[in-house]
Image (cartoon, rainbow, N blue to C red):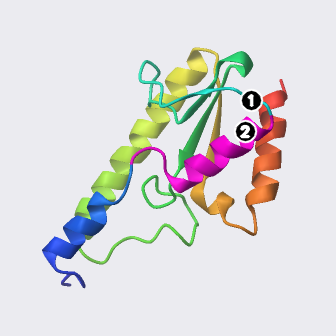
Amino acid sequence: MADVHSSSIRSYNMSRIRAKNTTPELLVRKYLFSKGFRFRINVKKLPGKPDIVLKKHKTIIFVNGCFWHGHKKCKYFVIPKTRTEWWLNKITRNICNDKKSLTLLRKCGWKVLIVWECQLKPNKMKQTLEKLELMICSN
């Protein structure tokens, strides 16, 4: 099946996808900051280069895009109809890398929390962020 976009349009679309400072990340960071949490972002020295590191609470937060990290049973994780095998390999690699990073971080004593992009949609965002705050503060 051919792509619905020309290669130049597809290239432009893909170039607009950011690896950090995504809208979901900014939503989580803004909420945490408003609640008095202080944190570091994209810490390169830690496995997986976590999106948010709350050292005081020994907690790490990954804000995952549903498509890029293969969120199971999520309506936002749709396998592309073009280059399907390539995309499945890419997403599978992402999932494997995520699992390795989570294992290493937990072995080092970090509490690891994952917030999915779909959990930050307007109808679920407030509940998700309040739950996240509780999970950070709980032992």
In terms of secondary structure, what is the magenta stretch mainly? helix
Residue at 85% across / 28% down in the picture?
A: 138
| Quadrant of residue 2 within the rendered picture | bottom left
| Quadrant of residue 15 within the rendered picture | bottom left
> Disc 2 or 1, which lies upstream in sequence?
2
Residue at 55% across / 60% down in the picture?
A: 72
Is 104 a magenta residue?
no
Question: Where does label 1 land, which residue?
Answer: 37
Check disc 2 and give the amino acid type: Leu
Q: Secondary structure at mark 2?
A: helix
Check disc 1 and give the amino acid type: Phe
Is 137 left or right of 65, judged from the image as shown?
A: right
Q: Position of residue 112 (x, y in %)?
A: 63, 31
Question: Magenta region: which residues?
Answer: 19-35
Q: Which mark is residue 32?
A: 2
Q: Secondary structure at mark 1?
A: loop
Is 128 left or right of 46, judged from the image as shown?
A: right
Q: Position of residue 55 (x, y in %)?
A: 65, 18
Q: Are there few (<14), some (14-19), or many (20+) residues within 10 Å of tag 2?
A: some
Instruction: Quarter of the image for the C terminus: give it.
Output: top right
Is 3 left or right of 137, judged from the image as shown?
A: left
Q: Is residue 53 above or below residue 91?
A: above
Q: Position of residue 50 (x, y in %)?
A: 51, 32
